[in-house]
Image (cartoon, rainbow, N blue to C red):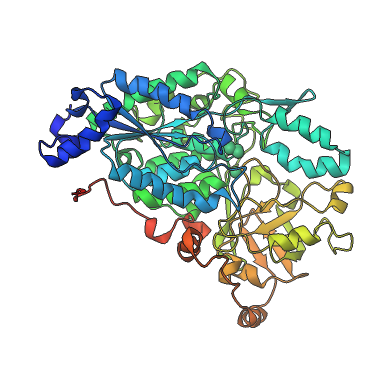
Amino acid sequence: MKDKKHLRSSEWFGGKDKMGFVHRSWLRNQGYPDDYFTGKPVIGICNTWSELTPCNGHLRDFAEVVKRGILEAGGFPMEFPVMSLGETIMRPTSMLFRNLASMDTEESIRANPLDGIVLLTGCDKTTPSTVMGACSVDLPTIVVPGGPMLSGRFRGEKIGSGSMNWMIKEKQSVEGFSDADITEAEVCVARSIGHCNTMGTASTMATMVEALGLTLPGFSSIPAVDSRKKLFAQLSGRRIVEMVKEDLKLSKVLTRQAFENAIVTNAAVGGSTNLIIHLTAIAGRIGVDLNLEDFDTLGSKVPLLVNLKPSGKHLMEDFFYAGGLPVVMKELKSKLHADALTVNGKYITENYTGAVCYDDDVIAPIENPIQQNAGIAVLKGNLCENGAVIKPSAASKELMKHTGKAVVFESMEDYHARIDDPGLDIDKNSVIVLKGVGPKGYPGMPEVGNVDLPKKLLLEGITDMVRISDGRMSGTAAGTVILHVSPESTVGGTLALVQNDDLITLDVENRRLHLEVSEEELTKRKTAWTAPKPLADRGYVKMYIDHVEQAHKGADLDFLVGGSGSKVDRDLH
Ligand code: FES
Ligand code: MG
């Protein structure tokens, strides 16, 4: 057990002088007894609850449950809010604010008398933003993932929150979906508290933090409404107090091995391409060297074991009933680094030895996977010198090797204005190229890469085409969609130089994305190219545009990479 005087919080509360008085006295207005200030580990509960983040709407209750566990273990719980990012509401995209929320988390932790941290997370960006911020301080930290919603049912059919969005245009154009149909479907999709119930970005992030070793084992797949979710939240509260005593800091858990485990696990569950951006940014904060190629080298040969939407058939509730992530981790045992430490103090593979699969249609055994080589493929070529990504498990096999004529949209507005124009020269072999949706360009790299197909082709029964952009794609979406093109068009990447009717070749097997235009012609076009005017001249958005890194580096702000530790030398008087 760590000596009481070594608690970080004692630098605030332990003083017998004026400053000790100041730090304790105002907190006394909450009625805390004397012994709360003498050697109890102070645990910050970093809460992303917000009514504007519906996926995290239940986290106020959860904080109370975490507090029970902290109190039982002899800790002093202190809940605090941080900026919460609601995926479905924030404009122009929640991703623009991920780094801002990470700064909020980092500075709130460092500036306060905290010894350990519990991160309450849920909706897509609330997990990476808080983990990134916590990494830059590096205190003992545990994650409480808020859990997925129950499965949606619409007219007898299982539907996923998130995945339904991408069918609306098709349903309206092809099936004559009315306004009343849409209203009915809205409620059916969002059936309970919790985050999206597909293996979309939120479930991917929850899986990621468990695979990194940052949650109690088995926590991430439990639905938000299940009583076991609260049970695990309470146990996490108990555990963080122990972690402070053991000085089990984030940097002891988040080793290169842990990141490799997360990449392998993501491939096996068919997780979102957004993992790449977020995991890279987290690695940057904790000082682990991770690059885009690692996702392909480590992940692309991993078999797909989990049959969940958007690539498959089931939803997170089914995944939980089938045994959840513990089964996947047990199946992956030979592919994981066994010596990665987790927050319960055990090594990762030790945690899952007792897992049992109850439904092999949901979680396949590794000897008989749903698909071989399922992970994310990293493409290179003159169209993406620093890389681009595609999720083969969500793409159409027949388009994985394809050459087609570019149909170029210079911006999202241009796309909306022309995509359904009956006169647009486009057919199923065309390649849709969307510019201006990268980190600096939009700004914030929104999830627009999986743009809807033109109505006239939907009516012909076409359901997929090759689409290329410098943006991201929702984890709940599918299609032959090439994302994260780096450098982005706004900084003058080759993507900026593509013109209508240029030929583009995609060859996923050989990891190639090539614009069939001569070097000479490209140089000519580059000379004539002028950079678009930045979309903000003040405030956070200007700072973001000036400092955001390209997608292949995780789209963090350049000056946020790394950490500053937990030490604060100066006091307020
Ligand atoms: Fe919040 Fe999908 S919108 S998790
Ligand atoms: Mg999303």
Q: Which of the 4 quarters of the picture holds residue 34? A: top left
Ligand 1 lies in quarter: top right
For the point 64% across and 67% down, which residue is it?
A: 495
Query: Relative to the observer, which residue lies in front, 336 or 240?
Result: 240
Quarter occupied by the N terminus: top left
In the displayed structure, would residue 351 be above or below residue 92?
Answer: above
Count of all numbered marks drawn on residues in the image: 0
Which of these two is toward me, 218 or 508? 218
Q: Position of residue 175 (x, y in %)?
A: 87, 38
Left or right: 498, with 446 as reference point? right
In this orientation, does residue 218 appear? no
Along the viewing direction, whichever of 256 and 493 lies nearer the viewer? 493
Q: Which residue occupies the extreme front position in the image?
A: 29
Image spot of residue 29 (x, y percent): 28, 29
Seen as rendered, the residue at the extreme left is 16
Residue 89 visible (yes or no): yes
Position of residue 457 measured from the top left corner of the image (x, y, whole percent): 85, 52
Where residue 32 appears, as percent x and y from the top left, is 25, 24
Q: With 289 as the anchor, is 162 left or right in this view?
A: right
Q: Residue at x 30, y 31 (%)?
A: 43
